[in-house]
Image (cartoon, rainbow, N blue to C red):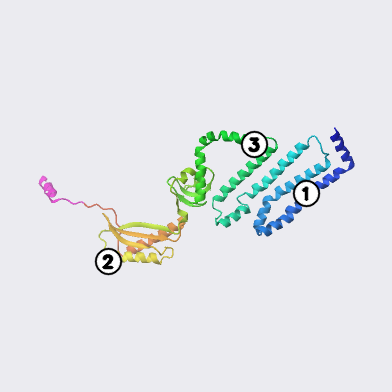
Amino acid sequence: MNGLTSFIERIRGGEWLIAIGIVLLFYLFSKLLTGWLLPRLFRRWAHGEEGTTWMESIRKPTRALLVLLGIYAAWEFYVPSGWAHEALIQRTVRSLAVFFASWALYNIAAVSSSLFQSIYRRLGMDESSMLIPFLSKLIRFLIIATALAAIAADWGFNVNGVVAGMGLGSLAVALAAKDTLSNVIGGIVIITEKPFSKGDWILTPSVEGFVEDITFRSSKIRTFADSIVTVPNATLASQPITNWSRMGKRRVTYTFGVALDTNPEALERAVARIEMELRLNDQVHPDVIQVRFNEFQAGSLGILVYFFTNTTVWLEHTRIRQDINFMILEVLESEGIRLAYPIQRVKLEENAAFAAESIR
């Protein structure tokens, strides 16, 4: 009752105007700090656009925290000490302060923040690397868990008891989540060893396609049928992975057959001409080019063609192969060489022929 009476007397005395002035002063200071002073400091410290990103991450949390401090300062000035609910107000203010500070840290830990942009550059990684999103999720989880633990402890909850209880049940949880834990460990192995990045074309015994995402438990692969295959990280980490996107050049190798009665001189000229055309093609890598008459087959003479295209892009690669195949057909036609086709020769034994004649 005494506190309420003092509260009313202060209203009559005009002290409420000073309290409102304190709130407005903190509000104007927050606008000045987040709108003028901090942006200039961040731009000078973090060089332009990066500093702007830092400032955008903490602008709203910082302004909210300063306004909260202004309200609390006005409350401390206006309300007399010893008020019945003073402890509740102080506890609420502390919890809100922890919340706003955690909000700022949570924004800074975003993948797009300048913190991780600088990590990209210093570690020499591109933005398709999956390490940074993985770290961002982990740091954000730790920020939320720490903030909740701090707020709970301030409100009188026994956090140590909760942690001890979690320790007692950790064995059961570990057994139940064995597969999940193995997938998380597999994800860490994939991220640290970096056998592929987002957007890479990979081939494994279980799936082939383009990597779209990696999470704590699994990786998402978009197949050539335009479907998404979700592969557990433990499975992916234990399999051989072929990363086609990291080829510097793309191999072409095959053997085609020509007719058995082909003229040897014409065949030699055709082999030399095909190899020369490949060496003159600026879309073919010049290091390894082989065109060889290398084997006798049952119904044909085998010609080996072996080279690499400069491009690794699938559509461009197939177009180059088509152009080269047409070139080979033109060379064979100009030299009068026919491609082999399936044949079967039947040889009749002389005794079998006499036997057939006697039957007649």
Q: Looking at the picture, how far across and down is residue 332, in whole percent?
A: 32, 62
Mark 2, other Cα within 10 Å: few <14 / some 14–19 / many ≥20 = few
- Reading the image, the residue beneath label 1 is 27
* Drawn side of residue 145 relative to residue 237, left or right: right
Rendered image: mark on residue 265: 2
Residue 159 has which mark?
3
Q: Quadrant of the N terminus?
A: top right
- Neighbor class of circle 3 (other Cα within 10 Å; few <14, some 14-19, many 20+) is some
How many marks can you see? 3
**Residue 232 visible to the viewer:** no
What type is the residue that disc 2 sits on? Answer: Glu
> Residue 236 at x, y = what percent?
47, 45
Which residue is at 74% across, 53% downward?
Answer: 33
Q: Position of residue 26 (x, y in %)?
A: 78, 49
Q: Categorize mark 1 by other alpha carbons within 10 Å: few (<14), some (14-19), many (20+).
A: many
Question: Disc 2 or 3, which lies upstream in sequence?
Answer: 3
- In the picture as drawn, the residue positioned furthest to the top comes out as 1
Span highlighted in magenta in the image = 346-360
Q: Residue at x 63, y 44 (%)?
A: 143
Which residue type does callout 3 highlight? Val
Dot placed on the residue nearer the N-terminal end, 2 or 1: 1
Under tag 3, what secondary structure? helix
| Rendered location of residue 303, percent (x, y) | 31, 59
